[in-house]
Image (tube, rainbow, N blue to C red):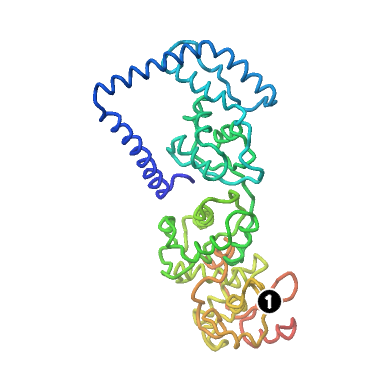
Amino acid sequence: MFGTTRQRRHMRARNRQYTERARKASRWGNSLHPATQTWRWMLRAAVLGSLAALLLWSRGVALAHLDRQVADADLQGRMLLDIHQAALALTPDNIEHWILSLSLELQADRLLIPPGGDPRPRPFEIGLGEPALYIAYRLENEGFVTDAELFNLYLRVQFLDRYLEAGNYMLSETMTIPELAEALNAPSYEEELVTLLEGMRMEEFAEVLEANYIVSAREFLDAVRDPRSMEIFDDYDFLADLPTDATLEGYLFPDTYRFPVNADRVETVVAKFLDNFDRRLGERGLTAEPALTPREIVTLASIVEREAAVAEERPLIASVYLNRLSGLCRDEVRGPYLESDPTVQYPLGNAADGWWPSITLDDYDRVQSPYNTFQNQGLPPAPIANPGLSSLDAVRSPANSVYCFFHTTGVDGAHVFAATYAEHQQNTLRYGR
């Protein structure tokens, strides 16, 4: 989830910038006159020696004072400042740690002041290899801390700066610095269980995802309407015959998914649909008994999905359309017209009136659209919905029939089937329009 090519390139670029700044600082120090450098080191040693002597005297006072702060704040069970970690040996590392600890102790009150009052969690991502100081400044920029240097100081004193893990986190402005440091050592994010139904079109997917705070509808639709703009596009062989101007309608596999709330990348969401589509197709892939291209299989399956309500009828409904396309029904139908109601509903669908509006007989002639299979021969130019596995299987392995028509019975979505137009007329009189 976090190791995409784009992220790695971006992370390497940021790390190069960070390293270059450090290198420039190092070159400046090395360019000084040797005598000047000697005086600098002597001055540094004198200062450190004085501070070490001072710390030996003040350490007990600092410990007592900090313990008093912790007790007063009633922060038991949290990851709190603990300068007891400093060892007693007078090594350079320990002296540096005592200095940092004393500096932090003098600002202990600020550790417990959250940067804001909004308790709602927001996503925050740590990329692979990001330095602790860089993370601290990003936290400051996004309003999770008010002082990046103080947060980084806390991490160093607590020996946590090397243990921040790459991953997704849900953080809030009401978290204190100790709470934030603890949270950033356990990557996690809030997840939502979301169900996308068979036969939904991509706009309906977008609405459901936005309603569950996964990703905005606009961002999702922008991605699936221009799939080639996503890095993941070339990862899926079944998209190889997708026309250059095509969307992902038909390839967003309907199922129940776990999505991260406020997903940081829309590609993460789209990849779940495409991965599932690929997995469910199995080794057979998009091949069918009739001579259909992979794109045609998905398109016909989307029509079957919208027409069928009874699972057992799907292979029969698929056979009706395939019989019409093959010419088997040419004596009963005026040509290879599918005459499918959902193909008329699809171009009429909109957010205001509904994505699958009711239609009348007049709409068969009134709706001017390449998707209208009452006016246009053959399959529509693209899928009209996202089919489930049963509809894809029905097209890949249709029933062997001579049917050219089907008509709803009005009971539980069931249909009756007919081979001739005369039989179909009888069914129409019996069951109504």
The residue nearer to you, when weighing 426 against 351, is: 351
Left or right of 25? Residue 409 is right
The residue nearer to you, when weighing 43 against 282, is: 43
Residue 7 position in % (x across, y down): 42, 47
Q: Tell me the quarter of the picture where residue 240 sits.
A: bottom left
Quadrant position of the C terminus in the picture = bottom right
Q: Which residue is mark 1?
A: 416
The residue nearer to you, when weighing 251 against 421, is: 251
SS category of the residue bearing label 1: strand
Q: How many marks?
A: 1
Residue 183 visible: yes
Residue 207 position in % (x across, y down): 62, 62
Residue 330 position in % (x across, y down): 53, 86
Asked if 249 appears above or below 267 in the picture, the reply is: below
For label 1, the crowd category at 10 Å Cα-Cα, with few meaning under 14, some 14 to 19 and many 20 or more, is some
The residue nearer to you, when weighing 162 against 151, is: 151
Residue 4 position in % (x across, y down): 43, 48
Asked if 208 appears above or below 179 in the picture, the reply is: below
Residue 403 visible: no
Left or right of 25? Residue 147 is right
Asked if 49 appears above or below 30 in the picture, the reply is: above
Q: Tell me the quarter of the picture where residue 238 sits.
A: bottom left
Which residue shows up at 66% across the image and 84% down it?
A: 424
Which residue shows up at 46% across the image and 69% down it?
A: 246
Amino acid found under the numbered disc labelled 1: Val
